[in-house]
């Protein structure tokens, strides 16, 4: 579970609670550059959170992510450079988001080791995602904006 507070339009600070691992960790996301509306000017973000799904308790990741919507399409690929405390090495997560419609997204993501699939239904105050983690574990994620 995550709780995040938008300090301003660039900075999100929060807490991540993982009851299975009995841990609470701080999170941070900072937008270095917002995506441009014309040409190639990708979104660039820096951040830290717990390491990947199924990582040992207390391990963190530190990442720089680059994302860019593809002009004339509903596709948005991303790639990250991620330092994994779990593996004590750099990993390269990547993925693609497909905006199916105004309220629906589909995403495939690779966390640097494993591939995960998501389908998300969005409203102005909430979103609900169905997940297929590692291509075999079914899950749900609910996000609510206060």
Image (spheres, rainbow, N blue to C red):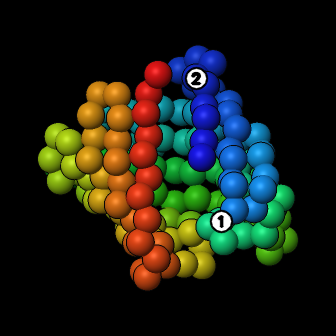
Tell me the residue at 60%/42% (across/down).
Answer: 2
Where, by quadrant of the figure, is residue 46 drawn? Answer: top right
Q: Nearer the viewer, residue 54 or 31?
A: 54
Name the residue at the bottom extreme: 136
Image location (x, y in percent) of residue 126 = 35, 35
Q: Which residue is mark 2?
A: 6
Q: Which residue is mark 1?
A: 52
For label 2, count other residues whose C-alpha is less than 10 Å away and answer few (under 14), some (14-19) or many (20+).
few
Q: Judging from the image, what secondary structure is the residue with disc 1 in?
A: loop
Tell me the residue at 68%/33% (across/down).
Answer: 14
Image location (x, y in percent) of residue 111 = 56, 69
Tell me the residue at 72%/70% (across/down).
Answer: 55
Q: Nearer the viewer, residue 22 or 95?
A: 22
Q: Is residue 43 above or below residue 74?
A: above
Q: Which mark is residue 126?
A: none
Where, by quadrant of the figure, is residue 96 drawn? Answer: bottom left
């Amino acid at each position: 579970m995550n709780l995040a507070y938008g300090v301003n339009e660039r900075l999100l600070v929060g807490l991540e609670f993982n009851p299975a691992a009995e841990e609470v960790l701080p999170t941070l996301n900072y937008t270095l550059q917002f995506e441009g509306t014309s040409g190639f000017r990708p979104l660039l973000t820096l951040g830290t959170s717990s390491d990947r799904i199924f990582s040992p308790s207390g391990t963190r990741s530190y990442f720089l992510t680059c994302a860019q919507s593809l002009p004339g399409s509903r596709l948005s690929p991303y790639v990250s450079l991620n330092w994994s405390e779990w593996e004590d090495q750099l990993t390269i997560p990547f993925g693609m988001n497909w905006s199916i419609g105004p309220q629906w997204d589909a995403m495939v993501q690779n966390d640097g080791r494993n591939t995960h699939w998501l389908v998300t239904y969005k409203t102005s105050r909430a979103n609900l995602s169905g997940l297929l983690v590692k291509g075999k574990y079914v899950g749900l994620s609910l996000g609510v904006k206060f």
